Amino acid sequence: MDTDSAYLELVIVAESTSTEIWLGDSDGHFVQKGVGLLRSRLLPSDYVVEFGLGSATHPISLTEKSCYTDACMRDGTRQAGFTFFRGG
């Protein structure tokens, strides 16, 4: 069984390269942090994101590889099946 294929790529980009990006599980427990950019491979599930600890919480339902920016999270859009940020 190829367990690696169960994981989905997630990229989250902040407007500022100095903004902390906090990724939490569906219970809101923060499990990963990035600064300016957070790139991860996760199991399909529900997650939450904050751009700066203690800021507004944005839900994500990860069902396919996805890319979010803080601007798209504020207006409720996302880009799934992205092709940038490959191989790095």
Image: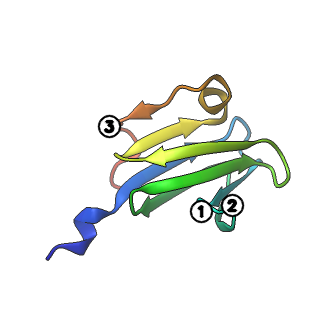
Can the viewer see residue 88 in this picture? no
Q: Residues under labels 1 and 3: Cα distance?
A: 22 Å
Q: Nearer the viewer, mark 1 or mark 3?
A: 1
Identify the residue at the far left of this view: 1
Residue at 69% of width from left, 65% of height from top?
A: 30
Secondary element at tag 3 = loop
Identified at 62% across, 32% down, the residue is 73
Pointer 1 with pointer 3, Cβ within 8 A: no
Residue 59: x and y in percent read 61, 44
Quick one: label 1 or label 3, which is nearer the N terminus?
1
Identify residue type, mark 2: Gly
Q: Which residue is mark 3?
A: 81
- Using the image, tell me which numbered label, if any, was put on residue 73: none
Residue located farthest toward the right when viewing the structure as drawn = 54
Whether pointer 1 and pointer 2 mark residues with C-beta atoms closer than 8 Å, the reply is: yes
| Rendered position, 67 above or below 37 | above
Label number found at residue 28 = 2
